[in-house]
Image: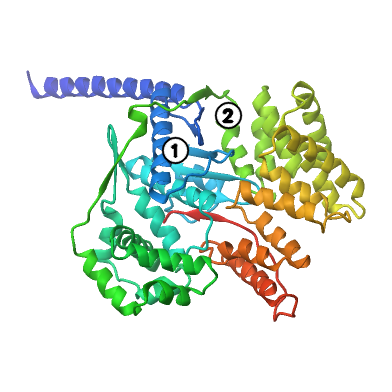
């Protein structure tokens, strides 16, 4: 074969190769399109939304349930499971993640708990499928739900890092192994002074924040796995829970200079680390998991709905996005999400037109009744004399609560709808807010408002117990400061304080 023929042959082979590759990519596109259908998997403690197939979705749900049992064993929690399951969204890009909750780039997951809702979002295209990030966020939720105590900032993150390194094998969970990323940061980066880690605010610049996370993980590992340190650490946490300042609690619990603990920690970082095996329950007893395939409209509307779940205030452009997406579909899911958007952020008349038929078909649907109450509450907030709208809101919220007594958002908004009523400053309102706080202790609106009413009714010690866990929130300094001011007012027992207490908004926990 001459050179021209050889070139022609090579070009022909290249053509066939590219055509085969194109066909393969086209087949993958169609396959991924089919696999991209959103699914909802509900288990005992979680509702997981994912575009994975049924098999992987069952594996992920079983892993989460195993992890929940592991966290119970690790922390000694024996209380019944929360009636409100954690919603988890597995997304496939950083853009989708940031669309639900705005945050800096380079973040793989976020846990959000505020007065609108509670959820975790994880980018499953991150390293390791985002599993470590997912476990980190679930650990935050678990501790805030079942052990809402005034933990120092370093331990809130350190515990989540310690728990999230759990590795799942066929019949066991191994935990306590080194966090590769955090260990690397300790070796390569500059350490924060331990005094700063223990007592200062969480750093905001990326380099020092990396050191904060790494040292928080290492210190948690040291204190939780060292027999001689565990009782001292328990005494330290008990002192903090009792209201002692961070430095006072450290002195009470450890009874040693910070410099001595820092030397011990640096020495610990150079030693081999022990780990523990925990039986994986799902291997012998598969958890009950119900998988539902969502309609095609979920492709356009599910993540917008998730956004509304954690955005108490209207976000620019969000309503327009929901309206545009819903206009392309004609099914109950699209109508429901559009009704939610109109009730929470849009046109009350449009909300009525959408909610009417939906409620006619499902008159006891607690979520729809909640949206109906929000439609009236929003009008009442802006009205010069909104009492009639407040009454209508209370009626819908009361029906929603009767249908679902565990929906804590309904309780918060019912209490708000009482503000124009003389019954607001009453034990009944306090009990409503305390129930909301008990159901969702990681959301702080009920806690802060209940504390203010308790102070107004001179129930000082109850107010103190409510406020202490909020004063150390490392992710919302404004909220923590508002709680500290209220705590000053409670401890003043009616005497004037230097600054008037102001509650602050609650927020999110993102994994660096």
Of residues 310 and 391, the one drawn nearer to the viewer in this rendering: 391
Which label number is shown at residue 275? none
- Residue 203, image x, y percentages: 44, 69
Q: What element carries label 1?
A: loop
Q: How far apart in space, not on screen, are marks 1 and 2 (Cα)?
A: 15 Å
Q: Which secondary structure, mark 2?
A: helix
Residue at coordinates 58% horizontally, 29% vertically from top-left? Answer: 298
Q: Residue 92 carries which label?
A: 1
Question: Relative to the observer, which residue lies in front, 229 or 353?
Answer: 229
Q: Write down the residue under mark 2.
A: 298
Residue found at x 79% / y 23%: 360
245 relative to 37, above or below: below
Badge 1 or badge 2: first in the primary sequence: 1
Is residue 222 left or right of 63 when viewed as pictured?
left
- Frontmost residue, 481 versus 50: 481
The residue most toward the left is 1
Q: Where is residue 68 in the image (x, y as percent from the top left)?
A: 43, 41
Instruction: Residue 187: give x, y in percent of width and height.
Output: 24, 65
Residue 414 sits above or below residue 470 on the image: above
In this rendering, does residue 206 appear at all?
no
Q: Is residue 254 above or below residue 62?
A: below
Quarter placement of the N terminus: top left
Q: Taking 150 as reference, is 372 left or right?
A: right
Please identify the quarter of the rendering in which residue 2 is found.
top left
> 10 Å neighbourhood of mark 2: few (<14), some, or many (≥20)?
many
Is residue 208 visible in the rendered structure shown here?
Answer: yes
Find out whether the residues at labels 1 and 2 contact each other: C-beta distance under 8 Å: no
Residue at 79% of width from left, 35% of height from top? 399
């Amino acid at each position: 074969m001459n050179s021209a023929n050889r070139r022609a042959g090579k070009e022909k082979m290249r053509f066939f190769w590219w055509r085969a590759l194109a066909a393969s990519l086209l087949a993958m596109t169609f396959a991924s399109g089919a696999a991209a259908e959103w699914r909802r998997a509900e288990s005992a403690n979680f509702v997981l939304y994912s575009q994975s197939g049924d098999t992987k979705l069952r594996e992920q749900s079983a892993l989460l349930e195993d992890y929940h049992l592991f966290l119970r064993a690790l922390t000694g929690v024996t209380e019944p499971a929360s009636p409100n399951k954690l919603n988890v969204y597995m997304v496939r890009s950083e853009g989708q993640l940031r669309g639900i909750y705005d945050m800096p780039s380079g973040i793989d997951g976020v846990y959000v708990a505020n007065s609108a809702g509670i959820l975790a979002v994880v980018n499953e295209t991150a390293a390791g499928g985002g599993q470590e990030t997912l476990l980190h966020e679930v650990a935050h939720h678990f501790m805030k739900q079942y052990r809402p105590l005034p933990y120092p900032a370093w331990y809130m993150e350190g515990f989540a890092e310690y728990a999230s390194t759990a590795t799942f094998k066929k019949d066991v969970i191994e935990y306590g192994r080194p966090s590769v990323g955090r260990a690397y940061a300790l070796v390569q980066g500059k350490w924060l002074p331990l005094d700063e880690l223990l007592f200062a605010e969480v750093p905001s610049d990326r380099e020092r924040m990396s050191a904060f996370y790494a040292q928080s993980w290492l210190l948690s590992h040291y204190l939780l796995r060292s027999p001689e340190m565990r009782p001292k650490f328990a005494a330290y946490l008990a002192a903090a829970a009792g209201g002692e300042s961070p430095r006072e609690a450290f002195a009470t619990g450890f009874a040693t200079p910070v410099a001595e603990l820092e030397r011990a920690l640096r020495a610990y970082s150079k030693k081999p680390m022990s780990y523990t095996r925990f039986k994986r329950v799902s291997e012998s007893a598969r958890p009950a998991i119900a998988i539902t395939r969502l309609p095609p409209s979920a492709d356009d509307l599910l993540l917008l709905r998730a956004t509304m779940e954690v955005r108490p205030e209207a976000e620019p452009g969000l309503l327009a996005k929901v309206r545009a997406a819903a206009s392309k579909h004609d099914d109950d899911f699209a109508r429901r999400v559009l009704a939610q958007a109109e009730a929470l952020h849009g046109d009350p008349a449009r909300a009525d037109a959408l909610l009417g038929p939906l409620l006619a078909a499902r008159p006891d649907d607690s979520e729809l009744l909640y949206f109906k109450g929000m439609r009236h509450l929003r009008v009442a907030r802006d009205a010069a004399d909104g009492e009639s709208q407040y009454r209508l809101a209370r009626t819908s919220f009361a029906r929603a609560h009767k249908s679902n007594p565990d929906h804590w958002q309904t309780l918060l908004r019912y209490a708000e709808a009482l503000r124009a009523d003389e019954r607001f400053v009453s034990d009944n309102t306090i009990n409503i807010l305390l129930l909301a706080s008990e159901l969702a202790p990681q959301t702080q609106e009920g806690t802060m408002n209940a504390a203010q009413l308790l102070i107004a009714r001179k129930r000082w010690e109850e107010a103190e117990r409510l406020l202490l866990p909020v004063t150390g929130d490392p992710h919302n300094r404004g909220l923590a400061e508002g709680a500290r001011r209220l705590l000053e007012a409670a401890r003043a027992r009616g005497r004037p304080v230097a600054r008037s207490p102001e509650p602050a908004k609650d927020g999110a926990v993102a994994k660096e």
